[in-house]
Amino acid sequence: MCEICRSEKLANQAHLSRRGLLRFFGAASAGLALVGTAGATEAKKPPKPQNVVSPEASLERLMSGNKRYVGGDSRRHDFKREREALVGGQNPYAGILSCADSRIAPEYAFDSGRGDLFVCRVAGNFANDDTIASMEYAVAILATPLIMVLGHDACGAIDATIKSLKDNSTLPGHLPSLVASLTPAVKAVSGSPGDPLGNAIRQNVIDNVAKLKAATPILSAAVEQRKLKVVGGIYRLKDGRVEMIS
Ligand SMILES: [Zn+2]
């Protein structure tokens, strides 16, 4: 298949998928920001016009927010006014897939308000079908232009996976499900020089960036059309700095 046919096919798939999502979630409740992607009748003024940005500008904004947070210069957020503006919908400027670890808090780490970040959190910040579906909603319905997979230092979920594999032990409850999701990254770097935990944390971010980029048909098409960027970062616990790794 030539490049043009391939692009058209991807665009059609993405459009059909978006219509399916609209049917599922309901256009009225979604607070649509379908800028340039759907019929004029579906378009609605985004509640936060400042969030309608390119993938590159979104990343810049995240990193400026992180700089303020690291320096202790976070802005005062007017929650009352934000609440009122967001009654009718949302148009977050970035999606974050982060660990559930209580020390991370993406809205703080990027000094962002409500309605700014579409956050999916799970211990070990990996993408499964549910998180991919959530990000598909953010990208196709809310027109979110950027997704960041955010790992962090000393991740307990990844550490537990390393120990479980090393000891050949089975963790209690539902934890084996987490271990299964994090095992590919741990195995990929086993035997590499350096700190096994740090290496696995980094590899897990890299793997999940790749997984989200390749998730067909919605996210992959948005990446192909340059409407979406997927990047990876690691949150440093000591100073709150987010270090970009991809
Ligand atoms: Zn963690």
Image (tube, rainbow, N blue to C red):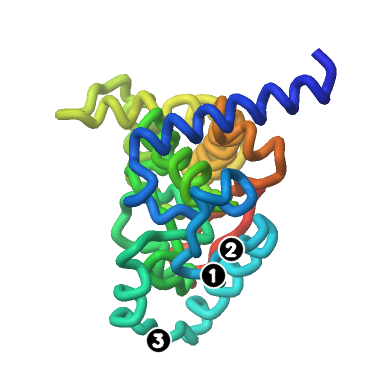
Q: What is the three-letter code of the residue carrying label 3?
A: Arg
Nearer to me, 15 or 151: 15
Q: What is the three-letter code of the residue carrying label 1?
A: Pro
**Residue at image mark 2:** 52
Q: In percent of the image, x 36 and y 76: which residue is there?
A: 82
Residue 125 in view? yes
Against 183, residue 63 (above or below) is below
Q: Quadrant of the N terminus?
A: top right
**Residue at image mark 1:** 49
Q: CA distance from mark 1 to mark 3?
A: 19 Å
Q: Examine the image and state in which quarter residue 243 appears.
A: bottom right
The answer to whether the residue labelled 2 contacts the one labelled 1, judged by CB atoms less than 8 Å apart, is: yes
Under circle 1, the secondary element is helix
Q: Position of residue 64 (x, y in %)?
A: 60, 74
Tell me: 3 left or right of 113. Answer: right
Q: Sequence-wise, which precedes: disc 3 or disc 2?
A: 2
Against 149, residue 68 (above or below) is below
